[in-house]
C-alpha cells in the first residue's frame, strides 16, 4: 500500500486567530501534523484537532540554516507517511519566511504541496499601530526590506536607493536598528525622519515606540523592545497621532472560542445531528467526575478497573471524548486537555461543571451510556438511545451522502486519471521519471452504488464523451454482464455491510474492470493511525450502542479486503466529514508499473 500525503505551506498572519484566512483555519482544523515556530500563538494552535501531532521547529539564534534543513526533511518525511501536513508560518509564507525554499525542496522530492497566503506583518503591524504605509499626502510607494543582515557582510541592499524611498518597512530589524538608521542618514535621509517600531503586533504584548531616525535605536534599547518587531520609517508615521485612538473590535478569547465561518458547513451540520449523543457522553462524564481523575494520565483499563466498568466500552467512550477535544491520548494513557482542566474539573476556580451538568440534565438522559460502560452490552432501542434506522432511512441517507460527494469524488478521479499508474508509483517511490502529457477522457465508467445520477452528471460535465453506466447492487440491482470498464466507482458500498457482504460486491466490481482499469471507492473510512472526527466518533458510538454487530471500516481493514481480491490500494484523499476517496488497481499491474519505473535512470 502506498499513499503520499500533502504539505500545505500556510500563512498564519500577524498572530491574532481572527486574522487567519478561512482556508488557513480549515487546514489547521483538519491537519494530521502541525509544524510551527515561535511566531505562532497558542490560540491559533488550539484550532487543531486533538489527535494532530504538533511539532515545534523554532529557529534558535545562529542556527537558522541547519534548522531549516531539519524542517525540510521533516515535511517530506511526514508527507511520505501519508499525512496532511500543515506548515504554519507567521505572516505570509513567501515574504521573508523561507517558504520558497521549502516549496522548492518539496517539489524536488515529488511531494504534493500547496501555498496558502497570509496577512503579512509588513503591512498589518503598521496598521495595528495606526500607521498607513501609503498616504496621498505623505507616501506613494512602500518598500519592504529584511533588516536581518544589515550589519553583516551578506548585506546586499542598496542603501542609497532605500534612503530615497517614501516608506520603509523593515522586518527582523530589532538588533540592527542602529546600523539601519546610521546607513540611511549617511546616504542622505534626514535624521528627523519619523520612525516607529511595533513589537508583537496583534499579540497580547503589543508595544509601539515612536522616535526619529536619529534616536529610534536608543529608544528601542531603553524600552527593551525584543523580536518579533517591525520597523517603519517615513512621514506616514506622523499619521499615528490621529489614528491611534481607534477602537479595535478584535478581542482576545481566553477560551479560544473563535468562529471563522458565517454558518455551519457539512462537517458542522453532521456534528449538530449527532449533538444529542455528545450531550449524553458529556453528562455521564461530568456526573462521574471523570475529568477530575484525568488530570494525570490514566489508561482506559485502569480507569475501568477503578470504577468497576467494562474496559472495552470505557475505551470507546474515552476515544469519543478525545474526538470531542476534551481529552488527549498519550502513550501512557488519557489525560485532560487544558480547557477540560479549566472548565470541567470540580476543583478549578473557573469550573463550569455544575452549570453544564444542569444543562445536560435538562435536555438529555445518559442512563444507557452508564449501563453500556458498566456492562459493555448494547441496549435495546428506545427512549434516550434512538431507534434502529429502517432500511428505507439508511438507503435515503446513503443516497444523500453519495449525491453530495459525487462532484468532489469526480474531481479526485480526474486528478488521478491525468497521471498513469507508472507515474503514481514513481511519485510514491520517489523515483524520477518524465511527466507524460495529460491522458484522454476515460472511455467506460461504471458507478456501482448510490448517487448514480449525480455521478453521471459530474462525469459528463468533466468528460462529455465518456460512457457512463450505473447500477446499485446495494438495492439488489445486478452488475453489468459485460466488463472492460476503465473505472469502477464504488459509492457508499461500506455503510451497513460486513466484510462478507462487501467481498461479494468487490468481487463483481473487479470482474467488470478492464485489465488496465482502476477502482475508486468513496465512503466513510478511518485513515490509518488517525482519530475520527467528532461527528464520526459520535455516530459510531450511537450505532454500537444499538447494534452489537456494527463495526467501523478502517484503511487497514479495507486494504485487507482489496488484497483478497488481488488489488493493491493506492492514494487516498479526504472529501468531508470522514468521507474519503481511495484508489486501487490490480496488484500485478502496480508491480509491473513499479518495475518499469525503477528501471528509469536517475
Image (cartoon, grey):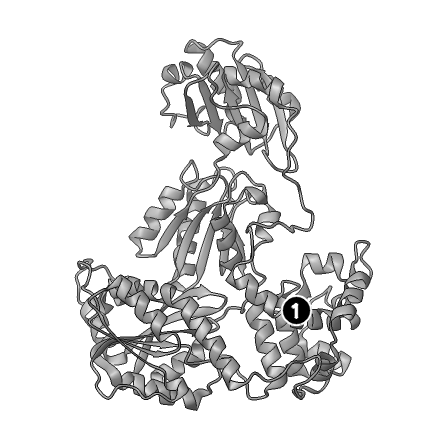
Name the residue: 46% across, 30% down. 148
Residue identifier under label 1: 334
- Asked whether, in this view, residue 535 is left or right of residue 377, the answer is left
- Asked whether, in this view, residue 20 is left or right of residue 571, the answer is right
On the image, the x and y values in percent for residue 272 come to 61, 65
Name the residue: 59% across, 81% down. 543
Picture layout, residue 517 above or below residue 566: above
On the image, the x and y values in percent for residue 496 come to 49, 84
Q: What element carries label 1?
A: strand
Residue 570 seen in the current view: no
Which quarter of the image is occupied by the C terminus? bottom left
Picture layout, residue 329 above or below residue 351: below
Which quadrant of the structure image shows residue 579? Answer: bottom left
Picture layout, residue 30 above or below residue 193: below
Name the residue: 74% across, 66% down. 291
On the image, the x and y values in percent for residue 117 come to 43, 43
Amino acid at each position: 500500500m502506498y499513499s503520499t500525503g500533502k504539505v500545505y505551506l500556510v500563512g498564519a498572519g500577524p498572530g491574532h486567530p481572527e486574522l487567519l484566512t478561512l482556508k488557513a483555519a480549515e487546514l489547521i482544523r483538519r491537519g494530521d501534523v502541525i509544524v510551527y515556530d515561535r511566531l505562532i500563538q497558542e490560540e491559533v494552535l488550539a484550532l487543531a484537532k486533538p489527535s494532530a501531532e504538533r511539532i515545534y521547529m523554532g529557529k534558535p539564534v545562529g542556527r537558522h540554516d541547519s534548522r531549516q534543513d531539519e524542517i525540510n526533511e521533516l515535511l517530506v518525511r511526514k508527507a511520505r507517511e501519508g499525512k496532511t501536513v500543515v506548515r504554519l508560518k507567521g505572516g505570509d509564507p513567501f515574504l521573508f519566511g523561507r517558504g520558497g525554499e521549502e516549496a522548492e525542496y518539496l517539489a524536488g522530492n515529488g511531494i504534493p504541496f500547496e501555498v496558502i497566503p497570509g496577512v503579512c506583518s509588513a503591512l498589518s503591524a503598521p496598521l495595528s499601530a495606526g500607521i498607513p504605509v501609503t498616504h496621498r499626502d505623505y507616501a506613494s510607494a512602500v518598500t519592504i526590506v529584511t533588516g536581518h543582515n544589515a550589519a553583516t557582510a551578506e548585506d546586499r541592499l542598496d542603501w542609497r536607493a532605500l534612503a530615497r524611498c517614501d516608506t520603509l518597512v523593515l522586518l527582523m530589524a530589532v538588533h540592527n536598528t542602529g546600523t539601519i538608521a546610521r546607513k540611511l542618514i549617511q546616504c542622505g535621509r534626514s535624521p528627523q525622519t519619523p520612525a516607529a517600531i511595533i513589537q508583537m503586533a496583534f499579540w497580547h504584548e503589543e508595544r509601539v515606540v515612536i522616535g526619529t531616525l536619529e534616536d529610534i535605536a536608543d529608544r528601542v534599547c531603553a524600552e527593551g523592545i525584543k523580536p518579533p518587531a517591525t520597523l517603519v520609517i517615513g512621514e506616514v508615521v506622523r499619521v499615528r497621532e490621529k489614528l491611534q485612538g481607534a477602537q479595535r473590535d478584535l478581542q482576545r478569547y481566553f477560551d479560544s472560542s473563535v468562529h471563522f465561518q458565517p454558518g455551519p458547513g457539512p462537517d458542522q451540520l453532521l456534528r449538530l445531528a449527532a449533538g444529542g449523543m455528545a450531550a449524553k457522553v458529556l453528562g455521564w462524564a461530568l456526573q462521574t467526575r471523570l475529568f477530575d481523575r484525568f488530570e494525570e494520565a490514566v489508561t482506559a483499563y485502569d480507569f475501568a478497573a477503578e470504577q468497576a466498568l467494562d474496559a472495552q466500552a470505557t475505551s470507546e467512550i474515552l476515544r469519543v471524548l478525545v474526538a470531542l477535544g476534551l481529552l488527549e491520548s498519550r502513550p501512557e494513557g488519557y489525560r485532560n486537555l487544558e480547557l477540560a482542566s479549566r472548565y470541567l474539573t470540580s476543583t478549578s476556580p473557573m469550573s463550569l461543571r455544575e452549570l453544564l451538568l444542569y444543562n445536560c440534565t435538562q435536555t438529555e438522559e445518559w442512563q444507557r451510556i452508564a449501563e453500556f460502560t458498566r456492562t459493555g452490552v448494547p441496549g435495546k432501542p428506545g427512549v434516550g438511545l434512538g431507534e434502529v434506522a429502517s432500511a428505507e432511512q439508511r438507503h435515503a441517507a446513503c443516497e444523500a451522502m453519495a449525491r453530495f460527494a459525487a462532484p468532489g469524488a469526480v474531481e479526485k478521479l480526474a486528478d488521478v486519471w491525468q497521471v498513469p499508474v507508472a507515474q503514481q508509483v514513481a511519485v510514491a517511490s520517489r523515483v524520477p521519471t518524465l511527466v507524460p502529457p495529460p491522458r484522454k477522457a476515460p472511455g467506460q465508467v461504471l458507478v456501482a452504488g448510490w448517487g448514480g445520477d449525480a455521478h453521471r452528471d459530474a462525469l459528463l460535465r468533466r468528460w462529455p464523451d465518456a460512457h457512463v453506466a450505473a447500477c446499485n447492487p446495494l438495492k439488489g440491482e445486478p452488475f453489468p454482464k459485460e466488463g472492460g470498464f476503465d473505472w469502477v466507482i464504488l459509492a457508499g458500498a461500506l455503510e451497513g455491510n460486513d466484510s462478507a457482504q462487501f467481498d461479494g460486491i468487490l468481487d463483481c466490481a473487479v470482474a467488470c474492470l478492464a485489465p488496465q482499469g482502476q477502482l475508486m471507492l468513496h465512503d466513510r473510512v478511518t485513515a490509518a493511525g488517525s482519530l475520527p472526527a467528532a461527528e464520526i466518533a459520535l455516530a459510531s458510538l450511537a450505532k454500537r450502542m444499538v447494534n452489537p454487530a456494527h463495526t467501523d471500516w478502517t484503511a487497514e481493514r479495507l486494504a485487507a479486503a482489496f488484497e483478497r481480491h488481488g488489488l493493491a490500494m493506492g492514494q487516498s484523499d479526504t472529501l468531508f466529514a470522514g468521507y474519503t476517496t481511495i484508489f486501487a488497481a490490480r496488484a500485478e499491474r502496480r508491480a509491473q508499473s513499479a518495475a518499469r519505473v525503477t528501471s528509469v535512470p536517475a
